[in-house]
């Protein structure tokens, strides 16, 4: 079997001259040679081989070329020379089956232009259909042996994500191009325990991710994601449900830690969206959908509260409306007490960070409202009022309806400009009884759906275009 090295690095011997006191040397070679070399986020070279004197300490190295990227952390010590060679090849792993070379993307979806004739194309398609099970077995055997040629991605823990006081540690996975034929997201995250995350961070090494394959309805699908190289394999989990007896609670999506510019970045909004400022956000989990009537009715039944008015628009998977901040807060307090987990409303900064999902445009999908993106007045919508949750595509973090449908309560007190209230939850007993609402609604025009848009309501107010979503730390 031919070896194709994917994002691998190996030590090569190299003899170099003297090193200055307090420095070490990093000698890099890349294939191809014209790759951009970044050290601690600064571009240091655009071709290799290159020798870089670096001060003692930890350094982040990034090698980028044509959308491919390798990232690692290196510890440089006084007088030491570290030499590494990186091969940036991201072709699908190849299998030799019945004397023919077959790659995984071809098994999933053979391309007509890869064959000289239509007859040859049809023959290959038939051969793959007949032998798909055996091909998958060959592939999975290589995966089980942890053959690095068959790794599907690289996993690592971001420095900003490591917070010993948190219960959620997102280990980022960057999938390789060949693995994306299985409709994998650009990035995924492992929901790691304290011990697992701490161990990975202390080792400071990237870990290979493997997938095994299954065939269903003549389609090849990815299955059994696993991170290896630790004491045990970790399941890859981007979302989860807590349960309460036999009841499944709202689906939660893991939001990675990060930094973002908060506020009216395009300078097309309102005065209360100023000043634009950088915010660091720790990792947390957020409900994928706005809390529905089905979710909230479990709470009212368990606590003997009166059901909320749905305006005869529908319950079940419609977002809950006519819910005050006090009632939304009572819901998360009940969830916390019943599950033993820390549920609450999101802070305003957490909400905007999650809604933007790494984007800087007015909406997470771009600067124009477009068609069939959200439920609002002026969105060319099919619903007169609320739409069933999840009726539109999710953002890059897997969150639905962060723009439109209903506005959403946050736990932060409202201030007419940013002065720090957006970073934390308000005390229920404080004098300021105004709370921030976000996200726009079926009733609002597109300008009120922007990720930066903010408004407010009093804690005891109920209206038919405001609901909420929840977070868990």
Image (tube, rainbow, N blue to C red):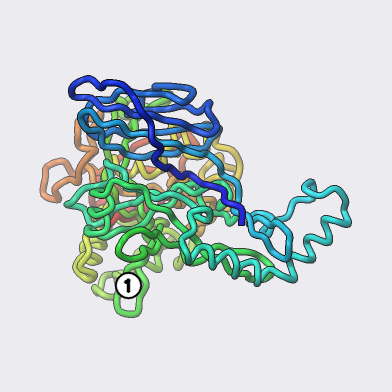
Residue nearest the observer in this picture, 217 or 464:
217
Q: Residue at x 25, y 22 (%)?
A: 19
Classify mark 1: helix, strand or loop.
Answer: strand
Instruction: Give x and y (percent) for residue 216.
Output: 63, 71
Whether residue 250 is visible, yes or no, is: no
Q: Residue at x 35, y 76 (%)?
A: 247
* The C terminus sits in image quarter: bottom left
Instruction: Give x and y (percent) for residue 95.
Output: 64, 59
* The N terminus sits in image quarter: bottom right
- In the displayed structure, 286 sits above or below 336; it is above
Instruction: Give x and y (percent) for residue 443.
Output: 47, 45
Whether residue 53 is visible, yes or no, is: yes
From the image, tell me which residue sits under label 1: 243
Q: Quadrant of residue 368?
A: top right
Tell me if 346 is positioned left or right of 71 in this view.
Answer: left
Q: How busy is the neighbourhood of tag 1: few (under 14 within 10 Å), some, or many (20 plus)?
A: few
Residue nearest the observer in this picture, 398 or 453:
398
Number of marks present in the image shown:
1
Residue nearest the observer in this picture, 227 or 163:
227
Instruction: Give x and y (percent) for residue 438.
Output: 36, 43
- In the displayed structure, 260 sits above or below 236; it is above
- In the displayed structure, 312 sits above or below 67; it is below
Give the residue furthest to the bottom.
246
Tell me if 248 is positioned left or right of 119 in this view.
Answer: left
Give the residue furthest to the front.
15
Residue nearest the observer in this picture, 98 or 353:
98
- In the displayed structure, 45 sits above or below 186; it is above
Tell me if 168 is positioned left or right of 227 in this view.
Answer: left
Q: Residue at x 26, y 27 (%)?
A: 24
């Amino acid at each position: 079997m031919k070896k194709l090295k994917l994002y691998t690095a190996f030590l090569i011997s190299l003899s170099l001259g003297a090193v200055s006191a307090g420095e070490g040397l990093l000698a890099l070679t890349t294939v191809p040679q014209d790759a951009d070399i970044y050290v601690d986020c600064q571009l240091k070279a655009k071709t290799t081989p290159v020798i870089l004197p670096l001060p003692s300490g930890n350094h982040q190295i990034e090698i980028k070329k044509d959308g491919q990227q390798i990232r690692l952390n290196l510890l440089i010590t006084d007088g030491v020379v570290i030499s590494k060679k990186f091969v940036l090849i991201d072709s699908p792993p190849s299998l030799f089956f019945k004397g023919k070379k077959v790659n995984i993307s071809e098994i999933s979806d053979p391309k007509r232009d890869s064959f000289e004739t239509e007859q040859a194309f049809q023959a290959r398609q038939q051969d793959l259909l007949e032998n798909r099970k055996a091909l998958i077995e060959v592939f999975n055997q290589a995966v089980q042996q942890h053959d690095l040629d068959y790794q599907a991605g690289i996993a690592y823990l971001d420095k900003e994500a490591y917070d010993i006081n948190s219960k959620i540690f997102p280990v980022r996975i960057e999938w390789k191009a060949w693995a994306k034929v299985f409709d994998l997201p650009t990035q995924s995250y492992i929901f790691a325990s304290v011990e697992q995350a701490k161990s990975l961070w202390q080792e400071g090494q990237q870990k290979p991710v493997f997938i095994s394959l299954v065939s269903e309805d003549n389609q090849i699908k990815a299955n059994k994601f696993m991170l290896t190289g630790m004491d045990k394999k970790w399941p890859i989990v981007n979302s989860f449900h807590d349960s309460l007896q036999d009841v499944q609670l709202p689906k939660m999506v893991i939001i990675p830690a990060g930094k973002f510019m908060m506020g009216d970045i395009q300078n097309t909004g309102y005065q209360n969206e100023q000043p634009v400022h950088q915010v660091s956000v720790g990792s947390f989990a957020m409900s994928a959908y706005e809390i529905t009537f089905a979710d909230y009715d479990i709470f009212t039944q368990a606590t003997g509260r009166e059901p909320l008015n749905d305006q005869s628009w529908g319950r079940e998977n419609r977002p809950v409306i006519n819910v005050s901040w006090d009632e939304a807060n009572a819901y998360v307090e009940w969830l916390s007490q019943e599950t033993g987990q820390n549920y609450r409303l999101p802070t305003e900064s957490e909400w905007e960070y999650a809604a933007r999902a790494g984007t800087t445009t007015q909406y997470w999908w771009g600067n124009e409202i477009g068609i069939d993106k959200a439920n609002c007045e002026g969105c060319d919508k099919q619903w007169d009022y609320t739409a069933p949750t999840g009726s539109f595509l999710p953002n890059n973090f897997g969150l639905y309806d962060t723009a439109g449908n209903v506005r959403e309560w946050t736990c932060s007190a409202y201030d007419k400009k940013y002065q720090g209230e957006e970073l934390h939850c308000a005390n229920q007993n404080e004098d300021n009884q105004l709370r921030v609402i976000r996200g726009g609604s079926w009733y609002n025009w597109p300008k009120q759906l922007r990720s930066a848009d903010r408004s407010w309501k009093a804690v005891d107010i109920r209206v038919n275009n405001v609901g909420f979503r929840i977070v868990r730390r």
